[in-house]
Image (cartoon, grey):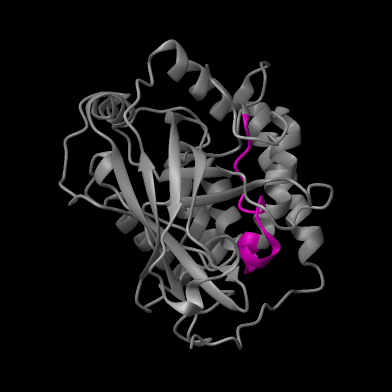
Amino acid sequence: MPATDWTEIIAEDEAARFERHAAFLAGLQQKHAGGGAPGRALHVKASVGVEAELEVLADIPEAARIGMFATPKRYRALARFSNGAARRQSDRKLDVRGFALKVFGVDGKKCIPGMEDETTQDFLAIRTPVVPMRDAEEFMAIVRAASTPALLPLKLIGALGFGRGVRVIRAALRGLKMPQSALAATSYYSALPIKYGPYAVQYAFTAREPAAPIEIADATHLGDALVARLREQPVSYDLQIRFYADAKTTPIEDASVEWNTPWITVGRLTLPVQDARSPRGQKVAALVEDLSFDPWHAREDLRPLGNIMRARSVAYRVSTQTRKSAPEPRDAPSFD
C-alpha cells in the first residue's frame, strides 16, 4: 500500500507572506490591463477553451479508489489550454504551456470556505513534470525578475544567490526549451502534490498519441491546430496519478524535486469532436474565459498540498476577485 506518513511544514509567517505575494500579482493584473478590465495574473492567453468528458475507469487498483475515483462514472467538463505568461504573446515565444480542467457534478465537501457545497472539481497542470523553484518565495523571485526580461538572470541571482539562481535558471530553460508538440500530443502534469484520501499524489493528463516535435508557424498556431483537429477527430488523455513514497524522493514541500514513483491510470479525458469556432464553440470559449480555474476548487480528500499550493490558495482568491470572474456553476452548463 502507498505510504501515508507525508506531512506539511507550515511556517508561522507564511500567511502574511502569501498575502503580500498575492497583492503583487494583483498589481500585475491591473498594470497589464492598461486601464481596461483586468485579466488573469498568469496564463493570460488562452489557446482554446473546449468541452470535455472525464471518465473514471472501473479497473483501477484498490488504493486508487478514493473519493470521486471510488466508482466508475462519466463527468462533463470544460478544458482551457493556455500560455503561462502574464501577458498575451505569440505561441512562437518560449513559454510555460498550461492546461486546466473543470469537472461538473462532483459531490463531497469542498475546500474553499463558503464554497463547501459547490459541485465542481478543478485540475491544473503544465507540460513539465516538475517546476524549477522549491517554494513560493523562489516562484515570486522569478515573477519579479521577469518584469524586466533583459535583467532577469541578474535579478534572479541577486534574489536567490549565485549558485541557486543559476540552478533555477538552467532548470527553467530546460522546461521552456522542451520540444513543442501539438496540444493533442502534449502531456500535462500537476508537478505539485495533492491529497488523495489518506495518501498524497501528483497527477498527469498523459497524451494517448505519441509526441512529435512541430514548428510553430504563427502567433496562434497551437490553438488553431487543436481546433482543426477537433473538427474531425476526438482527442484523449489518460488521467494518471503517482503516489508519495518518502520525504526524500517525493517531498511535499520542495517542488523542485521530480517524483519518481510509477504512474497509475485512473481515468480517461476526452475532448469530443466539436467546432470551437462555431457559435456554440464561441459560447463555450466565452464561459471558459469568464470562469476561474483554481486547484483549491477541490474535494477535501483531494486538497492541494505543499508550500506553492498553499500560496496559490491566496493568489487565486485575490486574482479571481480582481478580475471579477464568473460565479462557480452549480450544474454543467448548456450551450444550446
Residue drawn at (62%, 73%) of the image: 197
Viewer-nearest residue: 322 or 157: 322
Q: Is residue 175 above or below residue 85?
A: below
Q: Nearer the viewer, residue 103 or 225?
A: 103
The answer, for residue 83, to whether it is visible in the render is no
The residue at 76%/53% (across/down) is 112
Which residues make up the magenta segment?
291-309
Most common secondary structure along the magenta stretch: loop
Looking at the picture, how far across and down is residue 329, in whole percent? Answer: 68, 34
**Left or right: 221 in relation to 260:** left
Residue 246 point in image, percent of width and height: 50, 88
Q: Is residue 55 above or below residue 228?
A: below
Specify whether residue 109 is in view.
Answer: yes
- Image position, residue 229 (x, y; %): 24, 29
For residue 75: magenta? no
Left or right relative to 92: residue 292? right
Residue at 58% across, 47% down = 144
Q: Is residue 327 above or below residue 255?
A: above
